[in-house]
Structures are given as C-alpha cells and as structure tokens.
Image: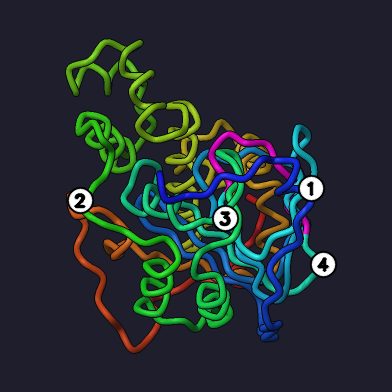
Amino acid sequence: MSSMKVVDPPRVWETQATALPRTRRDGPGAAVWVWSGGALYAGPSLRLGPHSGAVACLVVGVDGPFAVDRAATGRLAARTALVAPRVRHHVTAGGGRMVFLYLDPGSAADRACRTRFTAGDRGVLVGHRAEAAVVAGAAGLSAGSTSAEVVGWIAEAAGGGTASCADPRIGTAVRRLLDADEPVPAGVLAGQVGLSESRFLRLFREGTGTSYRRFRLWAQMQRAARALAAGGNLTRAAQDGYFASPSHLSSAFHALFGLPPSDLLAHDVTIRPLDSRTPAEDSGRSHQPATASSAPPPAISTQKYSQEG
C-alpha cells in the first residue's frame, strides 16, 4: 500500500468531494447480486442508520456526493469511498442512486481495491483513482444489467489479481466457511488447517481484516440472500442462514447494513445470483468462470414473495 497517500484525518474530513458531472438515471426498483463471498447493491439511496459491516464496502454516489460520519473523526464528503470492516459509520446521501460493493475479505479484489484510493485513513479511504469512470459505470447498473456488465464493472472498480490471503491456510478456511451448508465453529476449521484455535483466530483477523465471528455472520447472510433469490420469504431465509428466527435475521442484518431487510425488500428489489467467478476474484477458487451473457441471469423480484413468514 506504499502507493496510497494517507492524509491526516482533520484535513480529510474538511475536504469536499471531487466535483463530477451528475449522472442521474431514473429507473424502477433496485438490484442485488450475490456471489460466493461478495455482494453488490445498485438502486435508490437508502436511509441507512449507523452500522458496522463484516466486510469492506466500496460506496459510490451515482447521482451526487454522499457523507460518511464517524464519531471519532467527524464527517467526510465523498463520491467514492472504501469503508473497512468493523468500522462503525453512517452513510447519508441527498437522494438519487447509490452502489454498494461488498468485497470478499482477503480476496484479490479486497486487497487491490485498497490501493486504488488517494486519501483517507485505514478506516475510510476516499477518492478512487478512476473515480469518474467508476461513477459512470455504476450509473449503468440496474436490474436489467447482464452478468458481463456487472462483472466488468466490479473488475474496473475493485481491480484484481492472482493473490488471495497471504496465508494459504486462511484462504482455505475462508472458502470452506463460504461453501459450508451451515455455520462452522472456529475450532473445527482451525483443526482442519492445522492450527490451534487461538492462532487461527489471530491469523484470520490479520489475513482478512475482519473477525472470524463477523465473517461467519457474513456467510450466514449470504445463505439467507440465496434463499431470497430462490423466491423464499424472510422465514425461509432465516432458516437457510441458520438464524434462530426471522427477528434474529432482521436484527443481525440491521447491525451489518444499517436497515432491516424488510426496508430493503420494500424497494422493489430484484435479487440475482452471480455465482460465477468474477475477474476481481482470485484464481484459486473452484467456481466456474463467468460467461458473458447477452441477457441477465434468472432473477427473483420481491414483488413475487411475501416479506413475512
């Protein structure tokens, strides 16, 4: 990360977002894409509350700048920002469309994306080096976007490469946790990769930037999202994600994303699986490469299922 310019926080928080042309494009509803370890939201700006995510999140103001508030450092105006895992923050926007890209911890995309920002600190980076192109590409994302268009934008915004976690044992643990049908205790995975539980937890945090508990919750959210993409309701999503109840899912979702899932589903959201490997992901994964389709993949609109069990 030697190429990243780190600016003293007091000066960063006082700066204004770089002026870019407004790219407003009115369109129906919102879209969510989910793949192993990552997710992408494109749609209306949401009234998010303060929250702390499990994974790094690239935030893009499609129609204008937004603000990121943190208690310790104040308010930062930005058009693009990268929020680190476990950083409590509050994103506010004045309306229009937003894009949120959630990056697979420790992946090539996660590591590369951190080098693409010009200012900020370890908690929140701002000013993507290709900000104008990233914003313009984000403006084209919608429920009608093809897989190739989504994958292409992810590659442009996040970057990629062939390196995953520096410690291959942690990379193996991440993949096993994401591919498992149910939550896996840390001690079990530690034993599978030949580490004591305490050393495993330390290396996991160092390699991914997030805690094992938080990442296990992220994996549960991914399973819940797949249930919704398949047409299930929140009760089924809670069951598939191994949450104790729909209310447990709702509270956990609210803590990670800043709003309850019912509020997200109220935006006529379309959820699509994007389960092929994207160019932004590392090459050591078992998923099949993405194919450039001329039509969007099968989708489920929330108009077709109930938000309650």
Q: CB of mark 1 within 8 Å of CB of mark 2?
A: no
The answer to whether residue 231 is magenta is no
Quote the CA–CA distance across marks 1 and 4: 15 Å
Which residue does the numbered mark 2 point to in the structure image? Answer: 285
Quote the CA–CA distance across marks 3 and 2: 30 Å
Which residue does the numbered mark 1 point to in the structure image? Answer: 75
Mark 1: few/some/many CA within 10 Å (<14, 14-19, 20+): some
3 or 2: tag closer to the N-terminus: 3
Percent of width and height locating residue 294: 33, 89
Residue at 37%, 53% in the rendered image: 112
Quote the CA–CA distance across marks 2 and 4: 39 Å
Percent of width and height locating residue 27: 66, 84
Q: Main SS of the magenta segment?
A: loop
Q: Which residues are magenta?
A: 83-92
Quote the CA–CA distance across marks 3 and 4: 31 Å
Note whether 68 is above or below 199 in the view shown.
below
3 or 4: tag closer to the N-terminus: 4
Comparing marks 2 and 4, which lies closer to the viewer?
A: 4
Quote the CA–CA distance across marks 1 and 2: 39 Å
Mark 4: few/some/many CA within 10 Å (<14, 14-19, 20+): some
Percent of width and height locating residue 86: 58, 34
Three-letter amino acid code of the residue under disc 1:
Arg
